Image (cartoon, rainbow, N blue to C red):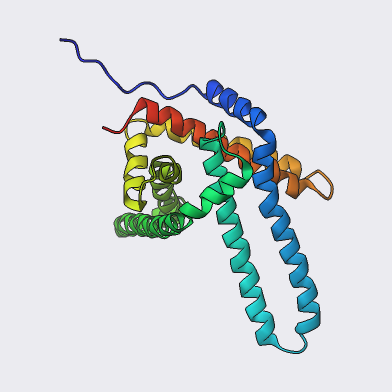
Amino acid sequence: MTKTNIHREVIAVSKSYHDTVALYGRSFFRFMGIAFIPTALTFVLINAFTLFALTTYASGRMAYFIATMLVIVTIILIQVWAFIALIYISLHHETSTVAESFHHALHFFWRFVKLGLAVSGIFFLSFLAGYIVVGIIGIILGHFSLSVLNSTFDWLTLIPLGVSAVVSTYYLFAPFSIIDTHAGTIAALKHSRHLVRGHFWPTAIRVVLLYVVVGMFTYAFQYVPAVGSILSLLLVSPFSVIYLSVLYRELTVSKPLS
């Protein structure tokens, strides 16, 4: 009996962007709503804090410091909440509304906090491993020629970044797995690694292309007077999440969990 390969090729780059734009267009106002709410809340918080700072800074630096920390933490929590809601609606765009997406995001919030801590630990270890490699190579090169070591040292420092980039690619889809399969932190990390394994280079190339496209649009929005940065947040952020959700869906079809 002939063996069949159940692993399909990763979605073509052109089709991935076509599907992303199509999905964005069908649910544009819902994606915009999820992107707009945290932006508006952040704007209100910053302006309220500015007024507070003008009236309290002179009377007590401790109160100013505490207020600053509270505002920063609140803004971070709002952005994380919105990020989870954005992933949720990208995976459930056919049935979920803006309000439902934010509601469900609260259910997954603690899992994302734990995922963030786990990924931070993984990145730290990957950086550490990269610098250990740099140190070993540096010792070997220094033993033979200090001039060669000096001329290549700047390039060697890219090794930790390269290791971290590889690691981030393998665990890129863990947030989508948490929402899609209701997995815990470890299970989501394993699922993401399972999806990327065997498709690393096609996935990495598509992610790099996404960064290039997002970077180009972000750069272009800088030239829009007054509202360029806001437009970048409202339009580019949802596009990135939608594209990754399209890629995630394709990989789950290509490599289903056994």
In the shown orientation, is residue 237 left or right of residue 164?
right
Q: Is residue 208 visible?
A: no
Task: Indicate left or right for 227 with 76 as reference.
Answer: right
- Which quadrant does the N terminus fall into? top left
The one nearer the camera, 101 or 44, is 101
Residue that extends furthest to the bottom in the rendered view of this protein: 59
Q: Position of residue 164 (x, y in %)?
A: 41, 50
For this rendering, which residue is in front, 141 or 19?
19
The answer to which image quadrant residue 194 occupies is: top left
Q: Where is 65 relative to 149, above or below?
A: below
Seen in the picture, residue 139 relative to 54 is either above or below; the reply is: above
Residue 234 x, y percent position in the rendering: 69, 44
Q: Determine if residue 93 is in view.
A: yes
View extreme (left): residue: 1
Q: Residue furthest right?
A: 225
Seen from this angle, which residue lies furthest top?
A: 1
